[in-house]
Image (cartoon, helix red, strand yellow):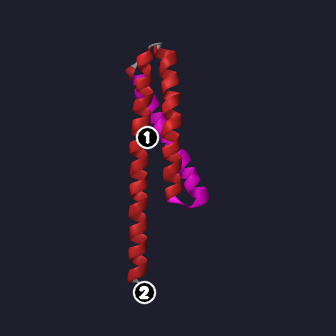
Amino acid sequence: MEGFFFILIGFLIVTANVIGFLFFRKKKNLYHAAFIILLLAGVFGGLGSVIALIIIRDPFALFYGLNIAYYLLINSLIVFLVAIFVTIIKKYTSSSTI
């Protein structure tokens, strides 16, 4: 049973990143992609809670969804920090070439 939930966590994280990447390709804005991943943290956290409730049938299964949301929030923070780092590098390289 644990293996299924680990696979589900990995699948939801990869899905959130792919959706964020698709929004990045569409809008060409890394901050927008980080925000989409942040929003998906809540959505996928709720989805994970519902799936865990259906499978385990225990009220404490809600904490599994909170665990998924936590991992996606950390993922969103990492994407946001990468966006800040890329922005700083772009500002630095554009100002040093002048």
User: With 50 as the anchor, is 69 left or right in this view?
Assistant: left
Is there a contact, CB below 8 Å, between mark 2 and mark 1?
no
Q: Which residues are magenta?
A: 3-30
**Helix, strand or loop at mark 1:** helix
Please say if 47 is above or below 31: above
Q: CA distance from mark 2 to mark 1?
A: 40 Å
Numbered tag placed on residue 60 in the rendering? none
Q: Position of residue 33 (x, y in %)?
A: 52, 53
Does the magenta portion include 91? no
Pointer 1: residues within 10 angstroms few (<14), some, or many (20+)? Answer: many
The verdict on residue 23 being magenta is: yes
Name the residue at 42% across, 42% down. 73
- What amino acid type should be assigned to the residue bearing mark 1? Leu
Residue 22 percent location from the top left of the image: 58, 51
> Which residue is at 50% across, 58% downward?
30
Give the labeled residue for mark 1. 72
The residue beneath circle 2 is 98
Q: From what the image shows, is residue 80 above or below residue 44?
A: below
17 up-or-down from 25: above or below: above
User: x and y percent of residue 50 in the render?
Assistant: 52, 23
Q: Give, as a three-letter code, the residue at label 2.
A: Ile
Which quarter of the rendered picture does the C terminus lie within? bottom left
